[in-house]
Amino acid sequence: MSSLAGKSALITGAKGGLGAAIADDLHARGVRVFGTARRKADADALAHRYGTRPVQLDLQEPRQCQVTVDELWIEQGPIELLCNNAGVNSPQPALDVDLEVWKVILDTNVTGTFFVSQAMARHWVEESINGAIVNVSSQAGTVAIEDRVAYGSSKAAVSHMTRTLALEWAPYGIRVNAVAPTFILTTLTQSTLDKPGMTERLTSRIPLGRLGTASDVTGAVAFLFGEEASLVTGHVLAIDGGYTIH
């Protein structure tokens, strides 16, 4: 039996892509999963999928984070695990990025991630729960990738946030780690990878010679949440086939 069985997890951005894969994997391991979505219909669908309560949350509205987490905690009881997966990207040359695009990416990927984490950690500290957070960062937070100045900046912030929160919250028994994937094959990335020559160009930068799959990431997330990683905190785990070796 998984060491995670019987625990509860909040997964942001669980509607599709990598977030859905993480939520499905944890659910299969016996975790009670609460998946967030921006739209009510999507939140309802996630609740039906996992047999839990809908959690509608827009990370571009950070003031919602504490309220949403408080309501969930009061109604459903303690939640030991948090995966900050929700994120957005809008590839553009740096000369073309406008303030609106910049704000959407940073507000979602950085500000929202922090305030959800803060909301959960406040409950863990108050109730002496050794919670665990896994943030979804990216290789783009470590190495420069063209047309991703806003996204890369946001993921670099997530990686450093991970280390800082791990340091501050370690005295409370809270662990904070992150995964930093390369390009992952999901329904949400398919349109990008379908562009002529894109897959070949990307894999040429990956020493192991292939793109990532969702299972490459879900196993790492489960490990970082589990008892096997009880002495691991402040770590950003690259799941990139060696992309960031260069």
Image (cartoon, rainbow, N blue to C red):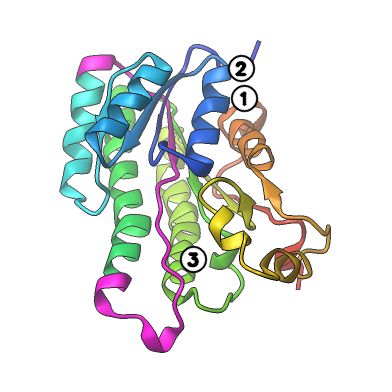
Residue at 62% across, 25% down: 227
Quadrant where the N terminus is found in the figure: top right
* Camera-nearest residue between 127 and 155: 155
Task: Look at the numbered discs 2 and 3 and tell me whether their residues touch, using CB distance below 8 Å.
Answer: no
Residue at 30% across, 43% down: 116
Disc 2 or disc 1, which is closer to the eye? 2
- Residue that carries the numbered disc 3 in the rendered image: 156
Q: Quadrant of residue 180?
A: bottom right
- Residue that carries the numbered disc 1 in the rendered image: 227
The amino acid sitting under disc 2 is Ser
Q: Residue 62, percent across and down?
A: 21, 50
Q: Visible in this render: residue 240?
A: yes
Q: Eyeballing the image, is 7 above or below 103?
A: above
Alpha carbon distance from label 2 to label 1: 6 Å
Task: Look at the numbered discs 2 and 1 and tell me whether their residues touch, using CB distance below 8 Å.
Answer: yes
Return the residue found at the far right.
Answer: 208
Q: Secondary structure at mark 2?
A: loop
Q: Quadrant of residue 214?
A: top right
Q: Secondary structure at mark 3?
A: helix
Residue at 56% across, 43% down: 233
Direction from residue 98 to residue 88 in the image, left or right:
right
Which region is colored magenta? Answer: 75-102
Q: Visible in this render: residue 176?
A: no
* Camera-nearest residue between 209 and 196: 196
Residue at 32% across, 72% down: 102
